[in-house]
Image (cartoon, rainbow, N blue to C red):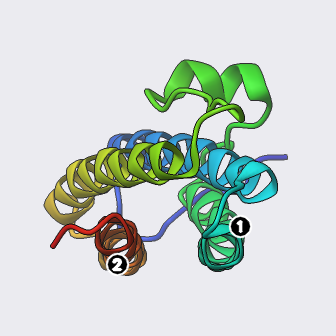
Amino acid sequence: MTATIDTGFTKAERTDVAQELTKVLADSFAVYMKTHGYHWNVRGPEFFSFHNLLEQQYRDMWAALDDIAERIRALGVVAPQGHATFANLTSIKDGDPDKEALEMLKELMKDHETLIATSRAAIEVADSASDEATVDLLTQRLAAHEKFAWMLRSTLGGR
């Protein structure tokens, strides 16, 4: 038995917002996995500080994945799962554990910038549907990824 969803959105609005959220979820999962992998494999004179920086970031992203997936479910859509599904939804490439530490950080900074763009596009769709709950969730994630990109940029010596 399927219950009717009556939260003030049409099925098309819920589907459109959920579709954008699945892109955010896939990009978030890809950046999470790469950050966690680079956390394991970073090496060099700045090992300890880079290792800790990446741990702070992947822990935040791990918690956010559940929030994003649960929002998709609240909209009445099945959340994507599985590596192949996520790989088809994201433009984030797998990391290379043999990269030098600074190259890892530079790549992650660019990945956060990609995720920022994905989030902004999703906010536009959610805002046009007057979906304040999704806009709020995505605004919080946007701020987190802007901060992560800034921290990585600053660590690399940029502004």
Label 2: few (<14), some (14–19) or many (≥20) C-alpha neighbours in 10 Å: some
The answer to whether residue 46 is above or below residue 19 is below
Callout 2: helix, strand or loop? helix
**Amino acid type at mark 1:** Trp
- Horizontal and vertical percent for residue 93? 53, 27
Q: Judge by depth and name the residue closer to the eye, 37 or 124.
A: 37
Quadrant of image for the C terminus: bottom left
Quarter where residue 48 is shown: bottom right
- Horizontal and vertical percent for residue 64? 61, 71
Q: Is residue 26 left or right of residue 65?
A: left
What residue is shown at x 57% (from left), y 55% (from top)?
Answer: 72
What residue is shown at x 30% (from left), y 74% (from top)?
Answer: 154
Q: Which residue is mark 2?
A: 147
Q: Is residue 58 visible?
A: no
Is the Cβ of the residue at disc 2 closer than 8 Å to that at disc 1?
A: no
**Amino acid type at mark 2:** Lys
Q: Is residue 123 left or right of residue 11?
A: left
